Image: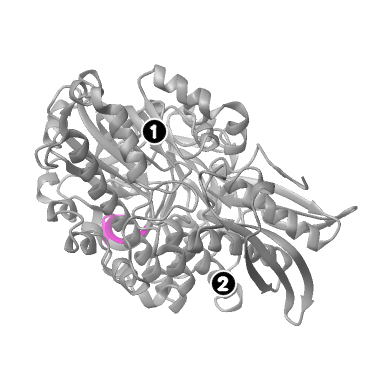
Amino acid sequence: MPYEYLEDSVTSDVTFRAWGRDLDELFTAAADATTNVMVGAVESISPTVTKPASVNAEELDLLLLRFLEELIFHKDAEGLILRATAVRVEAANDGHQVHAQLCGEPIDPNKHELLADVKAVTVHGLRVERSNSGWHAQVTLDV
Amino acid sequence: MAAPEGIRRIAESVWELPPTLRPGMRVPVRVFATEALLQAMDDQVFHQAANVATLPGIVGYSFVMPDAHWGYGFPIGGVAAMDPKTGVISPGGIGFDINCGMRLVLTNLTLDEVQPKLRDLVDVLYQRVPAGVGCRGFVKLSESEFAEVIEQGARWCVRNGYGTKEDLERTEERGCLTGADASTVSPRAIERGYRQIGTLGSGNHYLEIQVARPEHVVDATLAAALGITLPNQVAVMFHCGSRGFGHQVATDYLQIFLRAMTSKYGLEIIDRELACAPFASPEGQRYFAAMQCAANMSFANRQVILHRIREVFSAVFGRDPADLGLRMVYDVAHNTAKLETHVVDGEKRELLVHRKGATRAFGPGMPGLPPEYQKTGQPVIIGGSMETGSYLLTGVASGAATLFSTAHGSGRTMSRTKAKKSFRGRDLQQSMEQRGIYVRTVSYAGLAEEAGAAYKDIDAVVEATECAGLSHRVVRFTPIGNVKG
């Protein structure tokens, strides 16, 4: 599991750290970390629905924020719980962009272990950084 | 955790950090807390309150309430007033859950009458008031009808049969902020929120059945004036906000402000969660109008939930809601920014008051209170943890010291991640049941995060608000039933 939740963080919210060998892996892990705040056992989510996602931003950290916001948007607007697949982070003219397929299914309290509703991805302590082994990020979610 | 060096005691429960603490501070920080609560506050509270003190146009002080804890941007439990002409508006001073608030409803039932039906009552409320991740509301609206709701708030609900005129009278701002303009919110915000009216959400949102035990009536005269007249009278208290709609409004404008702050207005960014724009600017005015839409969604959300509570009580007890005495005491928010008139240095001034995790607490005789509360002062509802209790207080004249603001809850002391590792939801549910609190939850992990031990002592917090002259204790409510998202 390429992410962990921090105990010593903003008391009313959830902070996680995620990592990957490259940005594609990092974004995939951060998406799972976000989804796993809302439901337990993300592997149990069946990929019956696919929502394409494409976002861009000047800075890498805001790119990650907007990417994770897609998961939260579909959760509220369509009642879908999704995981990110086929994630591709690349340079764009005015910064960076990410393309992915968000796959999952309608939230079902009989099937999914519901945890906490995520309200927003915050910029509090938000960072995406290169490390010796690849990339890591820290994100605080408002719950 | 300890109060920073240089903090000065102004009065028994009032502390001050001077503007010389950090470069850029325009005003001092004033903390309202007992010494014990002050020493237990996260270091980040003082750091964040000092950041708030640097915001352009801040007037007087950057205030910290007794239940304050680490937030993002403002601390939760932070209050700051800005000059509307020269100052800024900041979504970080309001929170993502815009107009999140508390509603208190009384019954004329006593504990003896409710106890035999308590499980039924909580079970049916759990079924009928949607809660948890991804839940949908019971009021089916089109996106265009939702646009009416966000401009009209609880008034829309009453017009459509979800409440009474008296409900509106007893709601802050009569349940509608009139500056709301649906054209200032994104289609994405509407899409996120229009199916969620009539939902609790999750996290610390809840619906609770409570009892006012005779030994917990602190001020019998005020309690009677607010409708608490029976020994062991049963009440319903609930806590929720503007749901995904409000969260998206905050998200949208935070990003708009981040872009405009430096490039357009030359404002320095100290903390990106303190993104702001001049209140008088086009961006500031549009956010203010959109924020009022979100506030209206939250008033409407709590109004339709009250309607459902009335239906459930009526069905479980086989009696008419009016016969059960189901009447509102008050609905008050704790995540807002509002234009209010206050006296500053002997002069009346219009101010933009940000309250994030802080409750408005108008004193007796102030404009905006319904006639029945002119003498008592505004009812203030402070929710504690689900294991301990909650309070009804009133606003007092000395609340002018914080622009009539007080605490909003007990305030967390333990992160959600740590609480989840420290407690087990099912064990907690059983132990609470043994102590006479019947809980239904969508999420056992979520229940564990809300354990009483993850919060400050609510009694200490409300005592501090009284000691500091911010609000006056009337009744302490004890939980007997709880629906958790």
Asked if residue B451 can be seen in this view, the reply is: yes
Q: Position of residue B301 (x, y in %)?
A: 32, 55
Give the class, few, some or many, for how many residues have Cα within 10 Å of label 1's Cα (few <14, many ≥20).
many
Q: Quadrant of the rendered structure where residue B165 is?
A: bottom left
Q: Chain of mark 2?
A: B
Mark 2–mark 1 distance (CA, rounded to whole Å): 37 Å
Residue topped by disc 2? B261
The disc at residue B384 is: 1
Q: Position of residue B362 (x, y in %)?
A: 24, 47
Question: Which residue is at the far bottom?
Answer: A93
* Magenta region, main secondary structure: strand
- Above or below, B108 against A57 in this view is above
Q: Residue at coordinates 35% horizontally, 28% vertically from top-left? A: B389
The disc at residue B224 is: none
Name the foreground residue: B351 vs A1. Answer: A1
Let me know if residue B341 is in the magenta part: yes
State which quarter of the image contains the C terminus of chain B.
top left
Q: Residue at coordinates 69% horizontally, 63% vertically from top-left? A: A64
**Position of residue B72 in the picture relative to residue B197 (left or right):** right
Q: Amino acid at mark 2?
A: Met
The magenta region covers: B337-348
Name the foreground residue: B311 vs B273. Answer: B311
